[in-house]
Image: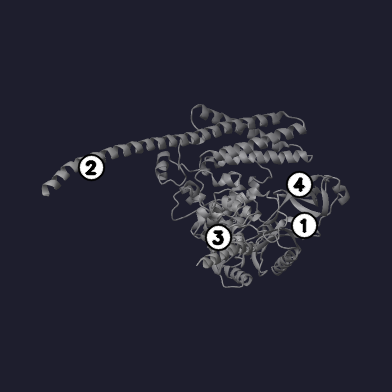
Amino acid sequence: MNQKYKNLLTYSVPVLMGFGLITAVIWGKAKSALADEYSKLADEYINTCVNSCARCADELEDSVSEMSISLSKLSITHSNEGQVLALEDIVRESAEASALLSRLPQSQIKVMELSNFLTRTGDYARSLSRKLLSGGSLDEQDDKQLSSTLTACESLAHELSARIANGEMPIGTEEFDYYDTPDEEQAESANGASEDEPSEPEYPTLIYDGPFSESTEKAQPKGVTGVDGTEADAKAIAERIAGCQLQSSSKSLGRIPTYDFSGDGVDISITVKGLHLIRYMRPASGTASGVPEKAEYEKLEKAGEYFLSQLGYTDMSPTYAQYYDGAALISYAWTLDGALVYNDLVKVWIDRESHELIGIDAQNYLFSHHERQSPAPSVSEQDAAQAVSERLSVTKTGLAIIPLTPQTETLCYEFRGSCEDSEYIVYVNAETGREEQIFKIISDENGQSAV
Amino acid sequence: MTGFKKGIVALMLVAAIIIPIIVMAGSVGYGARGDDVIKIQKRLKQWGYYNGSIDGIFGSGTLAAVKAFQRKNGLVVDGIVGSKTAAALGITLNAVNNSGNSSSGSGTTTNDVYLLARIIYGEGRGEPYKGQVAIGAVVLNRVKSASFPNTIAGVIYQRGAFDAVSDGQVNLAPDANAVKAARDALNGWDPTNGCLYYYNPATATSKWMLSRPVLLRIGNHAFC
């Protein structure tokens, strides 16, 4: 019995070990084949990424070169038409260049100045093209700015092509680092300055009026009037509006400094200067969505107007409405002698179930509201209508003051109408009789918006 | 015995016919077909809950996706798309009044809402609601700034801009709260008052970032 057991052990152990060894070898082979496959796959992915970055870099260099060619052509173009065409080329090339730049694996802080330059050059070109189309011409300042932009663009194109020729990716893509790397301190001590410092601005400053211009970024609010109030007074106002006890949560120092309060699901901000309500938000009680019936809409609109008048806003007219998450969001524009002032917008959220006020956003209004001259169109409505396409069957006409650029407004006639199942709003300048802007109304399950 | 069996079969047949009819009145469930199901499937697919085909038939795949969506969003997990689930999905059911189907030309807008909701969820779930809207607002403020890419996707996918993109959390399916925060941000609500950056003071290491003046704090984030 014992002997038999011993025999079994002597034979079975080597057999089992041999078996185990064979299994291990086969398993190892399979694993290494799999590892090979993975590393091949990884190489393929890395190559794809590197190639797509290389392509971006090449195309970025192309776009910047084309930009400088268009800028140099512009400098010797004499006709208005030729200048507009060159400017529109610059608009397109700069948009391409900034899109390509954003695809390079670079931290934003490193490419910030370059991005500013590319975007603003296009934005500036667009503003000049508008100016020419409305009968203006390029002045001395424009010539100066365009020539320094051309110089900057040419040297940028040179630098990019030299880097690509040297096998470098443009703007130092070789260091694959995020700006939150822990070894930043080392980089700093080695180079004397942090790797994450934005590069020195080497691009010209462009003075113009456009959505991306520096002056727009630094614009000061016009509608925040009054003297600085205390936090205690702000809290009393906030609690009266919210109808509940609130805690002070923070003081916000953004473009319009505010006292912020919260509690009971409510968030509310009151401006430091003048103690105006700027933002108020609390959750809706229901989950209703979708565009309401006309009767319900009228009730919601009335409710919105009532809350606005309670808050001291008079002469506000409803414009667009959106419906989501149990709330109706109606945007009201200030109305000056019958003309809608689209910049002075207050957004009001109303609960679909209780018809109570659940949100206010007066940021736009507080930013741009100021005394304006009463609208006095020099073109008659009939004459303005001549500028509207015959394809549009007009259903409603009115006056409106609209932003043409971030810092200028124009009095326009507003023609609402439809063409082939789509709704549009056409704005015709009430001074010149020229067509200024066209919006298409997008209607969906969440309401209406204009694009 | 056989009579009993027959009775059960008959009862099941009746139930099979009646239940969908009841369900169709204002809500959509297993076995339903039509435009509403297409709408539900499209949205679930877009939001990463469903990967079957958009065939307009409420089958087991759609049922599982609806349940997963309900579980994630704190709704009653019954697999039926009623008014609450439809609202959370951001769709309106036409089951009763089959009025004209509005053109779905706003596809880009829906995608923007969803992408913004994903970054909000990836970066800020666990933050107070206002802090979630603030994340969306920072993205939109960047779109409007010359220093950043000029599209929502460009800003979100810019290298190193958001940790949730670097580590893949941006691909998680967002909850209804994040979608609402994205909508509020797109509708102009900016609790940050124009800020372009935020960071968590407990974990941030970038000297450049830390040197910027903090304009406000919401939850765990400092905005600047």
For the point 44% across and 53% down, the residue is B203
Residue underneath mark 4: A437
The span from disc 4 to disc 3 (Cα, nearest Å) is: 48 Å
> As rendered, which of A32 and A63 lies closer to the eye?
A32
Tell us which disc is closer to us: 1 or 3: 3
Residue underneath mark 1: A340
For the point 55% across and 28% down, the residue is A161
The three-letter amino acid code for the residue at tag 2 is Leu
| Label 1 close to label 3 by CB (< 8 Å) | no
Using a 10 Å C-alpha cutoff, classify the residue at mark 4 as few (fewer than 14 neighbours), some (14 to 19) or many (20 or more).
Answer: some
Tell us which disc is closer to us: 1 or 2: 2
Single out the residue that lies furthest toward the top. A165
Residue A46 placed where, x, y %? Answer: 46, 36
Q: Secondary structure at mark 2?
A: helix
| Label 4 close to label 3 by CB (< 8 Å) | no
The span from disc 4 to disc 2 (Cα, nearest Å) is: 85 Å
- To the question of a shared chain for discs 2 and 3, the answer is no
- To the question of a shared chain for discs 4 and 3, the answer is no
State left or right for residue B112 relative to residue A442.
left
The span from disc 2 to disc 3 (Cα, nearest Å) is: 53 Å
Residue underneath mark 3: B79
When asked about the image quadrant of residue A322, the answer is bottom right
| Label 1 close to label 2 by CB (< 8 Å) | no
The span from disc 1 to disc 2 (Cα, nearest Å) is: 90 Å
- To the question of a shared chain for discs 1 and 3, the answer is no
Using a 10 Å C-alpha cutoff, classify the residue at mark 2 as few (fewer than 14 neighbours), some (14 to 19) or many (20 or more).
Answer: few
> As rendered, which of B143 and A229 lies closer to the eye?
B143
Dot 1 or dot 2, earlier in sequence: 2
Tell us which disc is closer to us: 2 or 3: 2
Residue underneath mark 2: A16
